[in-house]
Image (cartoon, rainbow, N blue to C red):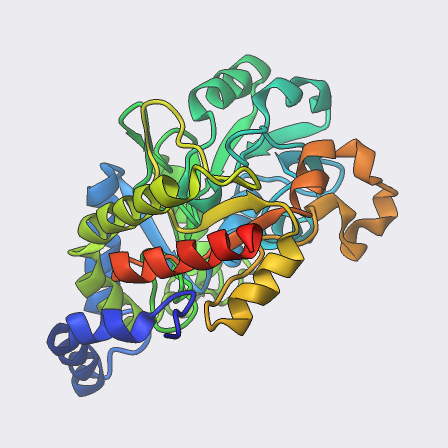
Amino acid sequence: MHIPFVDLHIQYLSIKKEIDAAINDVIRNSSFIKGNHVLDFEKAFAKKHDIKHCIGVGNGTDAIYIVLKMLGIGEGDEVITTALSWISTSEAISQTGAKPVFVDIEKDYFTISVLKINEKINSRTKAILPVHLYGQCARIDEIKKICEKNNLFLIEDCAQAHFAEHNKQKAGTSGIASTFSFFPGKNLGAYGDGGAIITNDDELAIKCRMYANHGALEKHKHQIEGINSRLDGIHAAILNVKLKYIDKWNNNRLKNALHYNKLLSGIPEIKIPQIRENAKHIFHIYCIRAEKRDELKNFLLKNKVDAAIHYPTALPLLPAYKRFNFIDSDYPVASGYTQKILSLPMFPELSKKQIEFVASLIKKFYHS
């Protein structure tokens, strides 16, 4: 059997009538840019987070850039972020003119190490940008205290953590603003690029909405120079449908992850993902650490099981950041883990039979 890494078609089939009706409504009303579908989604997404404002934007990368820019972060400033994430987190910092300052990750949870943040703070530091990686929240309570003590902005990158929780606090509700991606493969995904910003700060919300819309809240009334980054109506309509199912889908992902854990926990060559105490992990990615990782990946692919690596290189060690002259030993946990991490198939509709097949192949690989 072939087991895809993510099966978006099977998800579509489960809600086909609602999705088709939503898309048809957008076409019938020609509400492709802005419109009621976008407004409805922004209101619903904000309400589900118990947050005042949601601004739909073109993608998750733009969301980070817009927030940083509208907080006045730019040339000469520094923003602290994690050493393990997709490059959108750090490149958005650089695009403002600021410098990304990387911090190594925790050993058990893949998120930014709180213990190592303080040593990176100086007079140029303006914000901390943690990433809730793979669907698990960073130690946001402690990071928030560090921000408050040092008068820094806390901006949460929630691209992989739609409605994850820690201590019953939803991801994205602790800082001045938070950013989301609705890339198709996310837990809450559109059928193309999309993103959002949420915030309780009235002034920041106005600035972000204005900047994302060519610097205008009303057409032809440009208060500033901005950019063109808007959530398309067709994606908002799709997200409106999917938002009703996100809790169910997240719960299914967790059940699938726990089943994986049960089957893989007895394999000495495998380290299964840990769930933080008092956390709701929504498993955007099910990431193990494996000995002979590359060989295992090739074995799975040969047997029609799609596997991937998130991410093969720690951010500060990418060629894009060679100007900083970092070496592996500067980020020992992140750089070491990139040699072992392997993401297994994970989506809400994944069956027990499929999970058991993947686990049986892994056991066969190590014990043959």
| Residue 285 visible in rendering | yes
Q: Which residue is drawn at 65% across and 35% down?
A: 79
Query: In the figure, 253 relative to 19: above or below?
Result: above
Residue pictured at 77% horizontal, 47% vertical:
317
Q: In which quarter of the image is the C terminus?
A: bottom right
Pick whichever, 27 or 103, lies toward us.
Answer: 103
Total numbered labels: 0
Give the residue at the far bottom of this rendering. Answer: 28
- The one nearer the camera, 181 or 72, is 181
The one nearer the camera, 240 or 248, is: 248
Name which residue lies at 40% across and 39% down. 203
- Residue 264 percent across, percent down from the top left: 42, 43
Image spot of residue 266 (x, y percent)? 44, 37
The answer to whether residue 89 is visible is: no
User: Horizontal and vertical percent for residue 53?
Assistant: 30, 44
Left or right placement of residue 346 versus residue 96 in this view? left
Residue 298 as seen in the image, left or right of residue 160: right
**From the viewer's perspective, is residue 29 above or below residue 63?**
below
Q: Is residue 46 left or right of residue 151?
A: left
Q: Residue farthest to the front?
A: 368
Query: What residue lies at 69% left-to-right and 46% top-to-bottom?
Result: 314
User: Is residue 121 depicted above or below 20 in this figure?
Assistant: above
Report the residue that reaches farthest toward the top. Answer: 149
Q: Where is residue 31 in the image (x, y as percent from the top left)?
A: 24, 78
